[in-house]
Image: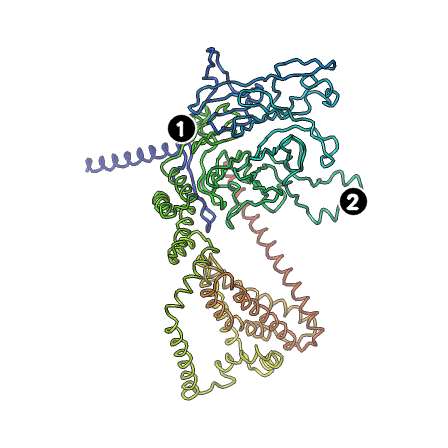
Amino acid sequence: MKSKTGRICKLIITLLFSVAICSSTVIAEPYQSYVWDLQSGIYYLAPDAMQYSRSINTKDLVDAAGQPVGALSNPTNIEVGADGLIYITDTDNNRFVVLNPDFTLNKIISSFKHTITDAAGNQTVIDDVFNKPGSIFIDDDGSMYICDTTGLTSANVDAADASKVGADNEAGRIIHLDRDLNLIRIIWGITSPVLPDGFVFRPSKIAVDGAGRIFVVAANFNMGLIELSKTGEFVQTLGAPSVTVNLIDLMWRAISTEAQKEQMTTYESTEFNNLDITEDGFIYVTLDTYDESANDRPDFLKKLNAKGGDVLKKMETNDPFGDFAAVGITSDYDGYARLCDVTALDNDMYAVLDRERNRVFVYNGEGQNLFEFGSPPDDRDGMYVSYINGTLNSPVSMDWLGDTCLVLDSALQMVNVYTPTEYGARIFEATRLHAANEYDKESEVWQEVLVLNNNSAAAKDNLGQVAYRNEDWPTAMKYFKEIYNVDDYSKAYKYQRKMLIEENFLYGVVGVVALIVLLIVIKKLWKKFVPKAKEQSYWGRLGYCKTVIFRPLNGFWNLTKEGRGSVGAATTILIAASLISVLQARFTGFIFDPDSESTNLIMTMLTLILPVLLFTVCSWAVTSLMSGEGTLKDLYIGACYSTTPVIILYPIAIVLSNIMVAEEGNLYQVFLTIALIWVLLLLFSSCMRINDYTLGKAIGVTIIIVVVMVLVVFLAILFFALIQQMIEFVQNLGIELSNRA
């Protein structure tokens, strides 16, 4: 007995110890990747596509003379040149730290030679220095465009221009150097009638396209990007963020005094905070500020064409702006993303950096999220030891060296390096094969991705596209349905339907003819062998619904005045209509209702039954005060019989939704619309005839009934909200009392 008890104790201790080890392992995990489930809105864990490799801390580096480089101070930007050199903008140290591709020190740029002409025409070469540089852009030839945000003074311009500088260190400049740090030009003092009065040019971020056009994000400027010509002259503003205006606020502003207007919110565009440019000249721009009172999710990311139009492709189910809050993973980080950087990658991919959740999100050209990586520091680690495992504290910029991501963290004062895992490498390889039109090889790689992550929407979408190009319509439809890609599913189904019709046309014609003959035979046999139901019987009253819906004025009069309807028959019709509505919600084709399989059957039934009951009660309450002749029973019977069109038209809509494609969807919507209008007209007719109203009085009474219904719904919502608050209050009170006890 003792030995058995001892074994049980040992087993329990072993299990507890194992749980403790597993728990500690989970807690120590620095970050976990996830994918977005398009149906449920829940994030599921996924393999890491990128893994932390190392951190680059400049204080561990020394220059050629053996002098320490020192730590970064408020770094703001990281840029990788075409030759692989890495440029870190060390803002508060007024310098640029340049690293080799192997992360060793290449050089430090802290000044450049600048020839100044004094008032007498004499030229002097000075060592010009930077003042709070904001970023650097490296052209394909290795030349540098530097945003010196407050570096303009009367001492570093020609004497003839000194009077144009204004207050020293208020304005900025763009410094263009060649790869050997020789000065090519300085761009400053941008002016134009388009720019606001008192505008001070303070460039913070910059990008240059293949034609030499310069695009600048300027501080305290909310009219979009500033586009400069190849020679540095102002051309236009580009892509100003849209402003969301509240109509009620505008109306209130129109009648307000000047003092009141000063206290109101001003409607101004927000500023872009970063940009990057693609090889074909499109410009990605980001912003991280928004109006929290606005209902619409702001466009944190745009892809601008030459005219400033946004051509960014977006998935119908999720914008490529990061996420809101990953359920079960990032619940402590609610709200919108705060994008602070964007990088255009090869093969039409791009990556965005979210400083709210400290993550990098990578998308393909269609706006589909391929993967994400990174994480904020673990709050349970007071000494921030988890930083060494690749988490981030305050990321400000990123760039990519091939498939390696470099993230600059201003708080950590270092660069975190992330490299692809086997899973991530396959995704990169698949996108390369797609860009090279090698679809068969691409399909093989995506299959490997799907094996590693069965929840990968990107893999399923691309496999569906490959199957579509190979005319394998069933396979394409399968993958598109799994990721709720309705448009492409409809295209594949269109060809599949065409093929099925061509292969089975003869069988279809024979089947239709046979069905018609069968219906005719059944009708004749029914008339011959089934006696006609009596008018006052249950079946007779049930069948009277045909007269009611096609001749409502006479039908509703006889329904109650002549006893042609009954509560039993009416209830049967209402239940049948609600069941048909359930079938419509559940079996509507995927193209017209992708979420039909997750339909709540009880709620769907109630969406028809409750409005009918509400209309019955409210119409009885109103008509009782408006000299109406109908009783509550009569009004209930009339309302139930009015739902008959649902029984007739919804089955037709169900069939059509399963054989039509998206382009033919108008016909499907026509049947649903006709059913709704038909039911509403019948409800109006029932109210008029059962209460013996004239047309004008019936219209007035119906309006009152609708108003009463709205008030009842509002009061019901208010009542349940108060009940919920009372329950929460009692629960909180109980918790407080138990804690005090």
Residue 175 location in percent, x, y? 61, 24
247 above or below 527?
Answer: above
Q: Which residue is labeled 2 in the image?
A: 256
Q: Residue at x 44, y 28 (%)?
A: 417
Query: Residue 192's mark?
Result: none
Name the quadrant of the N terminus: top left
Name which quarter of the figure residue 26 lies in.
top left
Between 42 and 267, the residue placed more toward the observer is 267
In the picture, measured across the screen, residue 423 lies left or right of residue 221, that is: left
Mark closer to the chain start, 1 or 2: 1
Q: Which residue is labeled 1 in the image?
A: 53
Between 175 and 108, the residue placed more toward the observer is 175
Residue 733 location in percent, x, y? 54, 42
Total tally of numbered discs in the picture: 2
Residue 621 location in percent, x, y? 65, 68
State how far apart marks 1 and 2 are (Cα): 59 Å
Q: Residue at x 37, y 73 (%)?
A: 507
Q: Secondary structure at mark 1?
A: strand
Between 680 and 133, the residue placed more toward the observer is 133
Identified by mark 2, the residue type is: Ser
Between 125 and 299, the residue placed more toward the observer is 125
Q: Nearer the viewer, mark 1 or mark 2?
A: 1
Identified by mark 1, the residue type is: Ser
The crowd level at tag 2 (other Cα within 10 Å; few <14, some 14-19, many 20+) is: few
Image color mode: rainbow
Q: Residue furthest right?
A: 257
